[in-house]
Amino acid sequence: MSKCILVVDDEFEFIDLLKYRLQPCNYKIVTAMNSTDALNQVWQHSPDVILTDLLLPDLDGLTLCEILQRNDATRNIPIIMITAIGTDVTRYSAKVAGAVECFSKPLDFEQLKKLLKLNIKGFVPKVTAAHYDAAFGGAPAPTPENEERIKEFSAVMKLEPFLRGMKELAPTIWLTALRKVQNPNRAGLDIVVEDKNFNTIKVSPVFYWSDAEMEAYLKQHNLPNEWDYFDPAKADEKRECGLHAAWGGERMGSGV
């Protein structure tokens, strides 16, 4: 069973950022925007870890910590305080209230990964977005005449870091969320296929799910959907960025 993290913050953007960074680690993420809602979520979900902001609309994070510390059923839940007021006094007050750690905003995810023992390793492009914008005028527009430029953009900004990660980690099995309905190229795949781009076995457990089935699953497990996600390396939702297409393997030198 996935471990559960309760995130308490009154800023939607910060909650979404934490969910984005933590959900790939197979954590169940539940959220609250004030202390009252947080206490209800604690009784309902019994979280393994609580990440809470210091300044909340009702009771502050310190008071929330103290309430949980006074209850036998909740005093052993690790609480991590997150605050924009990163002073020594604030950190001391958080520890006195019962927090195991106090982080300042903007949050240092490397510290959080270490504290939560998350097995995450990131691989980013060698070329920054600012450099690419200055040198090439930014991501190419998704038009037929820009097809080669889009592929070059994808090779630099997406395929190269992914290839570097696959070489270093050398997975035997690659789990994906590819689905048949996403585009014509993926319709030709299956749940289990040999991936020649990366010399691995690609497994897509939800391959035959419809959009409705995926949406129902995400809603049931309180997970974000991808409807607002735009990938400039694909340029269009029906295109491939190259990871799962033969042309991507050619640009990367035929895999790892």
Image (cartoon, rainbow, N blue to C red):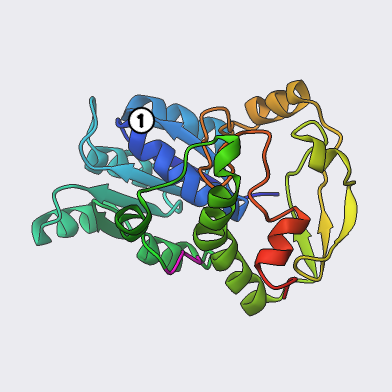
Q: Main secondary structure of the magenta part?
A: loop
Q: How would you rate the neighbour count of disc 1 (Cα within 10 Å): few for under 14, some for 14-19, many for 20 or more?
A: few
Number of numbered labels in the structure image:
1
Query: Which is nearer the eye, 113 or 34?
Result: 113
Q: Residue furthest front?
A: 145
Location of residue 164 (image quadrant): bottom right
Is 123 in the magenta? Answer: yes
Residue 192 % position (x, y): 90, 53
Residue pictured at 76% horizontal, 65% vertical: 197
Residue marked by disc 1: 12
Corner quadrant of residue 198: bottom right
State the image quarter where residue 178 is shown: top right
What's the amino acid at mark 1? Phe
Quarter containing the C terminus: bottom right
| Residue depicted at x 37% and y 42% | 68
Q: Is residue 73 visible?
A: no
Q: Secondary structure at mark 1?
A: helix
Query: Is residue 26 magenta-colored?
Result: no
Q: Bounds of the magenta span?
A: 122-126
Residue 180 as seen in the image, left or right of residue 73 = right
